[in-house]
Image (tube, grey):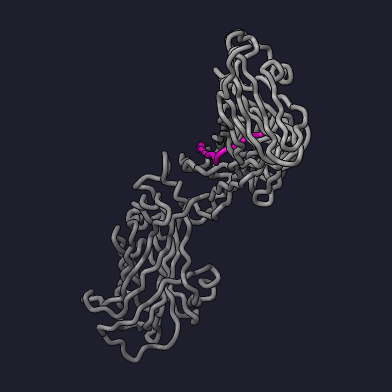
Amino acid sequence: MRNTYLLGLGGALLASTSLTAEVQAGTFNAYTAQLVAAGAKPTSGFTAAKIGAQLFGGTGLAAASTIGGQMVFINFSNQYNQGLAPKILVFPTGASFHASALAASTNAGNLTLVTTDASTTITATTNGIGSGCSIGVLTSQIQITNCTTGTSSAAFTGMALSGLIYTAATGLATVGASISLSGAVVETSNSNNTYETITSATVVTSVNNVVIVNGTGTATVALGTGATAYTSVTQTVGGNTSSGLTVILTQISFTGTGSLGSDLATSTAITNLVGNMGVVVTSSALSDPAVSNVRFIKPDGTTTYTNTTLAGTATFSSTNLTGATLLTGAGVGTSIVQVEFNGTTAITAAAAGTTVETFLANANTSGAALPTVTGAASAISRQGFTVQVNSVQASTNTVVTSYVRITNGGSVAGIPVITVYNASTGTVMGTFTTASVPGLATLQLSAKDIETGAGVTATAGGAYDLVITGTLPSGYVQHITGNPGNLFVDFSARRNSALGANQ
C-alpha cells in the first residue's frame, strides 16, 4: 500500500502567530479523494473505523500485525505562513505507528500541498525527505518539519495524513477498546513552545463482528377439552407464532455490525465471520413424554435440522448448522428452535431452560472463532388440574392393593387424564383418559382399571407413579392401599391440585 501525505492550504495569512499558554485546538476530520482532487479542506468530524474484535482471537492477528492504512485530516486553528514552518506532531494511543512500514520505500509518504490555488505546491517527497517537508516516523509519534510552500504569500491551515499503519494493537481484542490520535503544532526550534494542540480523536474502535441475540418467550398450555385435554399450546415470540402443539423454546438472530478487516477498508461480511454453529438447548420440557421432536427452523420457515433424540437436551451439531445455510440468503435473520408435542399425551410444566451456541471458525475468520453465546429457553406453564401420585402397586401384587380416587371439587363435570410412569425408571408406560367425573363426584379406579385403560402389562413387584391432569375445575386425589379383605389406608392423604406444577 502506498502512503500519501497531503498538506492542505486555505485562507489568508496570519498577520502574526504568537505563542500563548491558552492555545487554540485543531481537530481531526474526515478526508476523501474528492477533497484531495478539489484541494478543499474538510469540515466534517472524524468517524472511527470499526474493526472486528474477533480478528485478534485464536490464530488471528498477533501483536506485530499491521492495521491500516488510514487517512485522517488535521484542521489547524491557525494559518501557518512560509517563513514560520512549524513542527507538526501526531501521537497514537492504544497502538504504535508501524515505523518500518511507513518508512519503507513501498509505503513511503508523498507530501503534497493541497490548496485552492493549483499553482501553489510543495515538491513531492520520497521517504519523507525532500525540498518540501521532512517526515520522521517513530513508533510513538510522527514529526513533520521544514514545510515550505512554492510562493512567499502562501499559508496552510490543514494537513492530510494518508496510509497511517498501526501495530501493537492487540488491546482491540476487547470490544470497546480503541486507537486514538492526538497532536500539537509547536515551534521547530523549541517543542515546548506550542502554537496549538490537536484534540484527541478515536480513529479505530473494536466491535463484535456479529451481534447474536437469543430471545425467548413464555408458552402456556391452554385448557383443553375431551380426549385432548392439556395438549393444546399457543405462543407468539418476536412475531413468530407457534402452530398447533408447538412451543418456541428459543430464537437466535444474527446481525452484522459492518466491521472492517485489518486493512480498515474491506467490510467483513457476515458470511466471512462465522463458520459452522453448534447449538445445545437444555430444558426440562425436552424430558416430557408429550414431546415428539425438536426442529431448528430458519427465518424462511424451512427446517434445517430435526432432533428426535431427547433426554432433557437437544443438540444440533455444527456439521448440520453450517454458515452456508444459516448466514446467507434465507438463513439471515431470526431462526427458532421449536419443540413439538404429539397431541395425545398431557403436557407437563417446564421451568425456563438454557440455550448455548458455540461457533467454529472457518477459513475466512483469520483463525478467530466467535465467542460462545448463552441465553434462556422458554418456560412452559400449566393451567388447571395437576396432581402426582407415587408408588401405586401393580395389580399383580397380592399383598397390597392400590386404588386411586379422583374427586371433582367443582360443580362442572371434567375428564381426568392419567399418565403412567414406571416408578423405578421414570419412563412413560401409557396414558389413560377416564370417563367424565360429574361435579362434586368421585371416581375410584383400581390398579387393574388403570393398567387396562393405559394399555400397561402388569409385572410382579411392579409399581407406578401417576400424573393426573384434566379439565376438572378443582379437586383432589387419594391413593388408597391395603390388604385385600382387611385394612385399607389413605396412603397419600388428599393430594390437592396444583396449578402449573406437579405436587
Q: Position of residue 402 (x, y in %)?
A: 62, 18
Q: Position of residue 162 (x, y in %)?
A: 44, 64
**Image height of 463 relative to 195, above or below:** above
Q: In the image, is 214 to the left or to the right of 94? A: right
Q: Position of residue 111 (x, y in %)?
A: 40, 68
Q: Position of residue 418 (x, y in %)?
A: 68, 27
Based on the picture, tell me whether residue 69 belongs to the magenta stretch: no
Q: Nearer the viewer, residue 421 or 499?
A: 499
Q: Residue at x 39, y 58 (%)?
A: 178
Q: Residue at x 73, y 35 (%)?
A: 229
Q: What residue occupies the far front of the structure in this picture?
A: 486
Q: In the image, is 43 to the left or to the right of 306? A: left
Give the magenta range.
347-361
| Quadrant containing the C terminus in the rendered view | top right
Q: Nearer the viewer, residue 344 or 142?
A: 344
**Image height of 19 relative to 442, above or below:** below
**Image height of 287 relative to 489, above or below:** below
Based on the picture, tell me whether residue 356 belongs to the magenta stretch: yes
Q: Nearer the viewer, residue 138 or 397?
A: 397
**Image height of 154 relative to 313, above or below:** below
